[in-house]
């Protein structure tokens, strides 16, 4: 076997080993990327569940005599902002600025709901309204689910980002379009579950 053929074989073996290594790293990033998308999908589902509860909640609260109009309007407007048709939540993971705006809108909705629940304390007829209490219970459960989904999303992003930034994976990750993913960073106010300690439930 000539020296040239031996050299060629060595180059081919090295190229094959390198190819399998890159393939393994690529597939690992794909797996982590899909994990992030799955976690984000659950966050979206829980956000939507909350948004779907609001119309019935507002309709029930509107039945209370002299209920504060500004508080209701705040919830309605916050829901509208958080569910704008032009927001494509599926693409937010690749656009940190759009992601931040989306999360801010969700934070504002959570804060508006929190204010609504505080105001409800002034209305005994609502605290005795079974329909409202059922909706309130569903809302509380949904807020808790959102908190869990956000945490799991951040954990998935951390795993992905750590791998994406690690050397030598980072060398080819960006070439294949594997960019860093944004974290969910909620404000302290947005993380608070709306107050639900109704005197009527004691």
Image (cartoon, grey):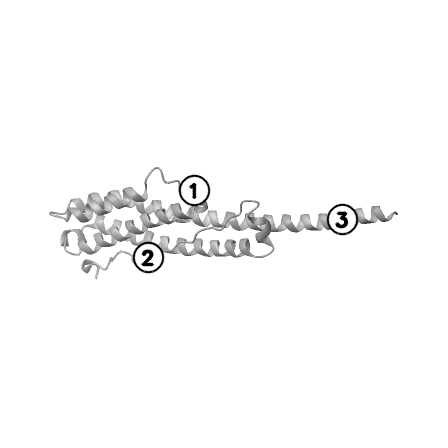
- Residue that protrudes farthest toward the top in the picture: 85
* Classed neighbour count for the residue bearing mark 2: other residues with Cα under 10 Å, few (<14), some (14–19), many (≥20): few
Q: Nearer the viewer, mark 1 or mark 3?
A: 3
Residue sitting at x 75%, y 47%: 12
| Residue marked by disc 1 | 90
- Residue that protrudes farthest toward the left in the picture: 66
| Residue marked by disc 2 | 187
Q: Residue 62: which quarter of the image?
A: top left
**Nearer the N terminus, badge 1 or badge 2?**
1
Q: Nearer the viewer, mark 3 or mark 2?
A: 3
Q: Position of residue 88 (x, y in %)?
A: 39, 40
Q: Quadrant of the C terminus?
A: bottom left
Q: Helix or strand or loop: what does disc 2 sit on?
A: loop
Front one among 184 and 117: 184
**Nearer the N terminus, badge 3 or badge 2?**
3
Q: Is residue 4 visible?
A: yes
Residue sitting at x 35%, y 37%: 86
Query: What is the distance, in whole Å, between disc 1 and disc 3 at their CAs?
Result: 43 Å
Q: Is residue 138 visible?
A: no
Residue sitting at x 51%, y 47%: 34
């Amino acid at each position: 076997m000539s020296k040239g053929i031996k050299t060629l074989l060595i180059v081919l073996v090295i190229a094959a080993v390198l190819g399998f290594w890159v393939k393994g790293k690529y597939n690992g990033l794909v797996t982590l990327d899909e994990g992030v998308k799955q976690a984000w999908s659950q966050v979206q589902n829980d956000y939507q569940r909350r948004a779907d509860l609001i119309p019935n909640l507002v309709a029930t609260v509107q039945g209370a005599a002299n209920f504060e109009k500004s508080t209701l309007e705040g919830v309605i407007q916050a829901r509208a902002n958080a569910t704008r048709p032009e927001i494509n939540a599926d693409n937010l993971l690749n656009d940190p600025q759009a992601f931040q705006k989306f999360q801010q809108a969700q934070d504002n909705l959570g804060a508006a709901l929190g204010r609504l629940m505080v105001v409800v304390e002034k209305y005994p007829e609502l605290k005795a309204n079974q329909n409202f209490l059922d909706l309130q219970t569903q809302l509380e459960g949904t807020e808790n689910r959102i908190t869990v989904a956000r945490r799991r999303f951040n954990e998935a992003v951390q795993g992905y980002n750590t791998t994406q930034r690690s050397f030598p994976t980072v060398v080819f990750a960006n070439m294949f379009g594997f960019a860093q993913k944004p974290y969910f960073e909620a404000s302290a106010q947005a993380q608070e579950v709306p107050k639900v300690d109704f005197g009527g439930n004691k």
